[in-house]
């Protein structure tokens, strides 16, 4: 099992992640500007790695740490739902803080 936020060069990430039977994958924010503001990095690599991982058939559980005032607004939930509805993830968990 691998527990990750997916922020790693794709070649390195996939080399490790494809060896796991299960990947727990945290998503924090869908909006690129807000993701950079709160985490210090773009979410482009994170989302790209997730998309590549699920297209290769890995079992992935997406976990969303729900942070009051940061990613718990109705629009945030809609963005997560729209994005994840298009991916064959095994399950989605909300981690309430």
Image (cartoon, helix red, strand yellow):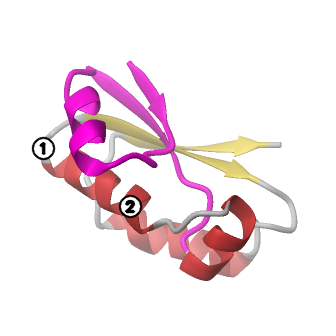
Position of residue 56 measured from the top left corner of the image (x, y, whole percent): 12, 44
Position of residue 67 measured from the top left corner of the image (x, y, whole percent): 80, 55
Neighbor class of circle 2 (other Cα within 10 Å; few <14, some 14-19, many 20+) is: some
Q: Earlier in the sequence, mark 2 or mark 1?
A: 2
Residue 4 visible from this viewpoint? yes
Neighbor class of circle 1 (other Cα within 10 Å; few <14, some 14-19, many 20+) is: few
Residue 71 visible from this viewpoint? no
Query: In the displayed structure, does residue 32 sit left or right of residue 90?
Result: right
Disc 2 + disc 1, Cβ < 8 Å: no
Residue drawn at x 27%, y 49% is: 10
Q: Which of marks 2 and 1 is in front?
A: 2
Q: Quadrant of residue 72?
A: bottom right
Residue drawn at x 73%, y 65% is: 38
Q: Mark 1 points at which residue?
A: 56
Residue drawn at x 33%, y 52% is: 50
Q: In which quarter of the image is residue 70?
A: bottom right
Q: Which mark is residue 76?
A: none
Position of residue 47 measured from the top left corner of the image (x, y, whole percent): 38, 61
Residue reaching furthest to the right: 69
- Quadrant of image for the C terminus: top right
Look at the image and say whether residue 21 sits in the magenta stretch: yes
Query: In the displayed structure, does residue 53 sit left or right of residue 76?
Result: left
SS for tag 1? loop
Please report the bounds of the magenta region as a residue range.
Answer: 1-30
Query: In the displayed structure, does residue 64 sit left or right of residue 11?
Result: right
SS for tag 2? helix
Q: Mark 2 points at which residue?
A: 45
- Quadrant of image for the N terminus: top left
């Amino acid at each position: 099992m691998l527990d990750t936020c997916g922020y790693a060069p794709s070649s390195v990430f996939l080399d490790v992640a494809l060896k796991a039977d299960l990947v727990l994958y945290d998503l924090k924010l869908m909006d690129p500007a807000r993701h950079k503001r709160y985490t210090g990095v773009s979410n482009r690599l994170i989302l790209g790695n997730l998309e590549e991982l699920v297209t290769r058939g890995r079992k992935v559980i997406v976990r969303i740490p729900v942070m009051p005032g940061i990613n718990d607004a109705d629009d945030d939930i809609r963005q997560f739902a729209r994005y994840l509805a298009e991916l064959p993830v095994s399950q989605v968990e909300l981690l309430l803080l």
